[in-house]
Image (spheres, rainbow, N blue to C red):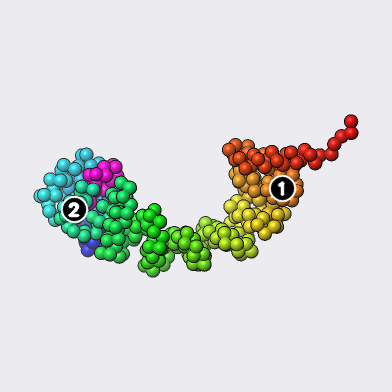
Amino acid sequence: MIRELAAWRPQSARAALEQCLRVWHGIPQVHLLAAQAAWQMQDFDAARAQLHHAQRRRGQADDDTAFAWALLEAAAGNVLETEDYLQQQASRRPADAPLIWEALALGYLRTYRTLDAMTVCNHWLEQYPDHVRALELRGRTFITGQGVSRGAQDYRRALELDPNRDDTRWRLVEALITLSAYAEAAEHLERAIELQPGMVEAYTQLGEIYEKQERYDEALQVYEQASLIAPHDPAHHSRVGRLYRRIGHLEEAVARFEKMAEMYPESAVAYDELGRCLSALGRHEEALQAYLEAIRREPETAEYCYNAGTAYKELKRYAEGAAMFRKAVQLQPDHTSAYKQWAALSAVSFLRQPRRNT
């Protein structure tokens, strides 16, 4: 656990410390280390609880607990009350200086003091070149200040030094997507999946990137894998169906949304998507029934009413179509397409009415 904290891996350190606390619950130093791991993960309530335990075990506050409280409060954003004290401690306790700089940088970022965070991180890296945590925090600081490209450079270097830093990899992926560097982002997501095959978020993000690159077969594969890892999440099935529809595999899309509607019978999205696919196949009567099922589940959604109106129009049931378009406008007054269709079908319905003899 000490090794994990020294390597700035608080998540794994915290897991080890929780096991230690079950055995050595009364040892103050273990609680102090657990507090450090907690605030490094920005779980400040848990950190405060651990510090209270440490103080009770020691019987009173002392220099170590005062220092630990200052680190916690600085990281939580209370830097005005702690920064002078901690800057003094950085000179008096040089071995703890990186921990102090981390707490201050986190606090400055939380309070939008970006220039102060950058000053701390730059000083840290001058003293400890290629310090992985300093690189991570400077990367975050660059990105907070809209320097996404430079932030990505720091994240890359941090991962070169320690490839197992999951949070940094995710932050780098987000930066690369912002920069439209999809190929590199995909490489990092593929690496994340290798390291943690059950990380469903990585499959979802990778599939979205593959779609941007028009690598549709690969996107389908990773979406299917995500649906196997989390079979009870309808979003994964929806992504598969929508991609099938997007690439023109309409029968496969219909099958997927029918399965989704069967698995999640209260899902209005499943029926609406099913209706869209059936409509594209020219199966307008079936599409209409699917849209009506969506409306039964979410009657206040204007788009479902609009889609039902288009199905009525295709079936030449103009009066019913006009009523649906009118409902869509009532639900969403700025829905200009629905308004135009309502006006057009209302006119058609009027002209088709039998005229009375005068």
Which sits earlier in the primary sequence, circle 1 or circle 2? 2
- The residue depicted at 62 percent of the width and 42 percent of the height is 337
Q: Which residue is mark 1?
A: 313
Depth order, front residue of 87/56: 87
Q: Residue 175 appears in which quarter of the rendering?
A: bottom left
Report the amino acid beneath label 1.
Answer: Lys
Which range of residues does the magenta coloring cover?
A: 101-117
Real-space CA distance between mark 1 and mark 2, rounded to the nearest whole angstrom: 67 Å
Classify mark 2: helix, strand or loop: helix
133 within the magenta span = no
Task: Point out the residue furthest to the bottom here.
Answer: 194
Image coordinates of residue 285 in percent, x first then y, are 72, 54
Q: Residues within 10 Å of mark 1 (few under 14, many from 20)?
A: some
In the image, what residue occupies the spot 34% across and 60% down? Answer: 169
Q: Which mark, residue 124?
A: 2
**Residue 347 visible, this angle:** yes
Residue 112 covered by magenta stretch: yes
Q: In which quadrant is the N terminus drawn?
A: bottom left
